Amino acid sequence: MARFGASTPLAEVDLFFAQEEWAKLRRPGAVESLKERLGELAAHLGEREYLEDRFSAGDLMMVTVLRILRHTDVLDGFPTLKAYKERCEARPAFQRALAAQMEPFQQPRA
């Protein structure tokens, strides 16, 4: 299955160093590396709805990783993965996990 250290370099380049010349030069390689990994993930997923026989913690984690790419159009090249991400995000279990994760950031500061 795909390893997803490949999403981090693209996120770093785009979100933290976009104006740096070295980042502009690095971005195409980061995108290509990521596309290779996404291809592996798409092949693993195949026609299944989820990574295993049912929605699992693995899907929660994988969709969290795929959400890192929201600022890009990279998933547009992988319709199976885009549909998988959207399917998982729509699940009540995902919504609850995301709400619990975000709750501390929504508390008023003292």
Image (spheres, helix red, strand yellow):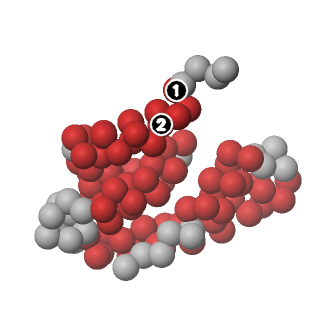
Q: Give coordinates of residue 45: x percent, y percent.
A: 25, 70
Q: Residue at x 61, y 61 (%)?
A: 8
Q: Residue at x 57, y 68 (%)?
A: 6
Is residue 37 or residue 94 the one in the foreground? Answer: 94
Q: Secondary structure at mark 2?
A: helix
Q: Give coordinates of residue 73: x percent, y percent.
A: 48, 47
Above or below 101: residue 84: below
Q: Secondary structure at mark 1?
A: helix
Residue 16 seen by the camera = yes
Above or below 52: residue 62: above
**Left or right of 92 on screen, residue 25:** right
Q: Residue at x 48, y 75 (%)?
A: 3
Above or below 3: residue 18: above
Q: Disc 2 designates what residue?
A: 102
Task: Return the residue found at the far bottom.
Answer: 1
Residue 79 seen by the camera = no
Q: Residue at x 43, y 53 (%)?
A: 64
In the figure, residue 109 lies in which quadrant? top right
Q: What's the amino acid at mark 1? A: Gln
Q: What's the amino acid at mark 2? A: Met
Asked whether disc 2 touches disc 1, contact meaning CB atoms under 8 Å apart, the reply is: yes
Residue 56 has which mark?
A: none
Q: Give coordinates of residue 57: x percent, y percent.
A: 30, 62
In the figure, residue 62 lies in which quadrant? bottom left
Q: Disc 1 designates what residue?
A: 106
Q: CA distance from mark 2 to mark 1?
A: 7 Å
**Left or right of 82 on screen, residue 26:** right
